[in-house]
Amino acid sequence: MGTMGEMVPTWRMVLRALALICVGLSAIAPAAGRTGSPLALIMVDDPSCRYCRKFEAEVEPGYSTSPFGRIAPLVKLRRGSPELKALGGAPANYTPTFILVRDRRELGRITGYPGAGHFYEELGSLLDAVGESHRLSREPAGHVGRGI
C-alpha cells in the first residue's frame, strides 16, 4: 500500500475517466423521442476564474431542470484536461467557454460569461443553429425575458 501522496494521481485518473465517460455517454447514449443524438454543453472551467464562479451562482443551480439543461446537460471540465483535448477542435483559451457537442463533435461555442441573459440568448442561438430550439417549451426557471 502506497502513501497518501501516491494515491492522489490514482484518484485524479479515476475522476478524469469518470468525466470522460459522462461526456461520452451523454454524447452517444440513445435518446428516445429526440432528433439525432443527445447534446451536451461542456463548460471549460478554471479554479481562478471569477466569471466561472458568477455562472455557477447565477445559472448553474437551475440549469439542469431548465429546458436548456434537459436538451444539453452541463458537463464541467477543467481547462487543459485530457478529456477536453480528446474532443479536438479549437482550444478553449478563455474561461468560461461553453462548447455544445454531439457525438463528441463541437457544434458551437460561447466564450465568456457577461451574465445570465446573454448566456441564454447565445445558447438559444446555438440550439437554433443545430435544429433543437423547437424543444424549448418554456423559459428557464428564474430567467425573465428570453423570448422563445
Image: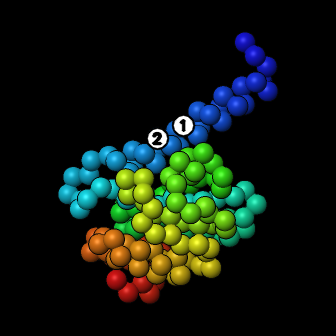
Contact between labelled residues 2 and 1, with CB atoms less than 8 Å apart:
yes
Tag 1 residue? 17
The residue sitting at 42% across, 45% down in the picture is: 24
Q: Secondary structure at mark 2?
A: helix
Q: Identify the image quadrant of the C terminus.
A: bottom left
Tag 2 residue? 21
Residue at the front extreme, as displayed: 89
| Residue 141 placement: quadrant | bottom left
| Res. 60 visible in picture | no
* Front residue of this view, candidates 115 and 103: 103
Q: Secondary structure at mark 1?
A: helix
The residue sitting at 72% across, 56% down in the picture is: 47
* Front residue of this view, candidates 138 and 45: 45
Q: Is residue 114 above or below residue 4?
A: below
The residue sitting at 56% across, 63% down in the picture is: 90
Q: Is residue 72 above or below residue 30?
A: below
* Mark 2 residue type: Ile
Number of marks in picture: 2
Q: Is residue 142 left or right of residue 49?
A: left
| Residue 17 placement: quadrant | top right
